[in-house]
């Protein structure tokens, strides 16, 4: 586990036209209850908006919640935008209705973990705590 002197900062984003955000809001609450600082972007975010918010908020983690089936298009674009913003070191996780074969492809493209429906909240919280990259201001 990475020891930090400050709270882990997490951005939770809902890309594309996916209008279902109940799961994202439940995760936001679980992360906050676990002591993390959480920024929720709200619905209908573009990859550019997500990367800009991640940079502006100086986050350690970007969580993508996607239920629309557009994950194979949107997540690679988000990765591209994060890299263009110089955020190569941000931990990227995804959740939602993502088939196992697509989850494998997303992991190969740079997503650290994919959490499907029914994943215990503690599993997502623990994964983030255990995998968040250390930063200069953690020391």
Image (cartoon, rainbow, N blue to C red):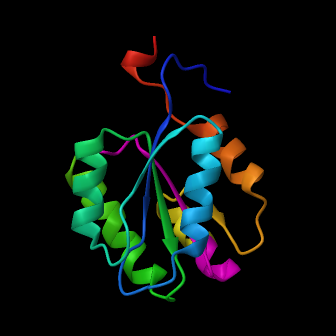
Q: How many marks?
A: 0
Residue 45 higher or lower than 125, as above or below:
below
- Relative depth, front residue between 29 and 133: 29
Residues 70 and 110: in front is 70
User: Can residue 11 be seen by looking at this rendering?
Assistant: yes
Q: Residue at x 51, y 82 (%)?
A: 20
- Name the image quarter holding residue 27: bottom right
In the displayed structure, would residue 97 be above or below residue 53?
Answer: below
Q: Is 40 displayed left or right of 108 in the figure?
A: left
Identify the residue at horizontal 29%, vertical 42% (top origin).
Answer: 57
Q: Is residue 86 visible?
A: no
Relative to the observer, which residue lies in front, 122 or 48?
122
Q: Is residue 24 above or below residue 32?
A: below
**Quadrant location of the C terminus in the rendered image:** top left
Q: Percent position (x, y) of residue 34? A: 65, 39
Residue 9 x, y percent position in the rendering: 44, 39
Residue 89 vertical placement versus 109 (above, below): above
Q: Give me the residue at 63% from left, 71% from top.
A: 104
Residue placed furthest toward the top: 139
In reply to whether residue 13 is colored magenta, the answer given is: no
Left or right: where 100 falls relative to 65:
right
Residue at image position (35%, 62%) is 41
Residue 76 appears left or right of 84: right
| Magenta span contains residue 89 | yes
In the visual, does 66 lie left or right of 88?
A: right
- Give the image location of residue 89, x and y in percent: 39, 40
The region drawn magenta spans 87-103
Identify the image quadrant of the N terminus. Answer: top right
């Amino acid at each position: 586990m990475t020891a930090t002197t400050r709270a882990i900062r997490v951005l939770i984003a809902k890309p594309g036209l996916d209008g279902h955000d109940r799961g994202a809001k439940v995760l936001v609450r679980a992360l906050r209850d676990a002591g993390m600082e959480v920024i929720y972007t709200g619905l209908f975010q573009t990859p550019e908006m997500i990367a800009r918010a991640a940079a502006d908020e100086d986050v350690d983690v970007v969580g993508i919640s996607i239920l629309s089936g557009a994950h194979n298009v949107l997540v690679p674009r988000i990765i591209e935008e994060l890299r263009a913003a110089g955020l190569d070191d941000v931990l990227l996780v995804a959740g939602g209705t993502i088939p196992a074969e697509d989850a494998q492809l997303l992991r190969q493209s740079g997503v650290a973990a994919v959490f499907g429906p029914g994943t215990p909240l503690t599993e997502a919280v623990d994964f983030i705590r255990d995998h968040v990259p250390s930063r200069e201001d953690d020391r």
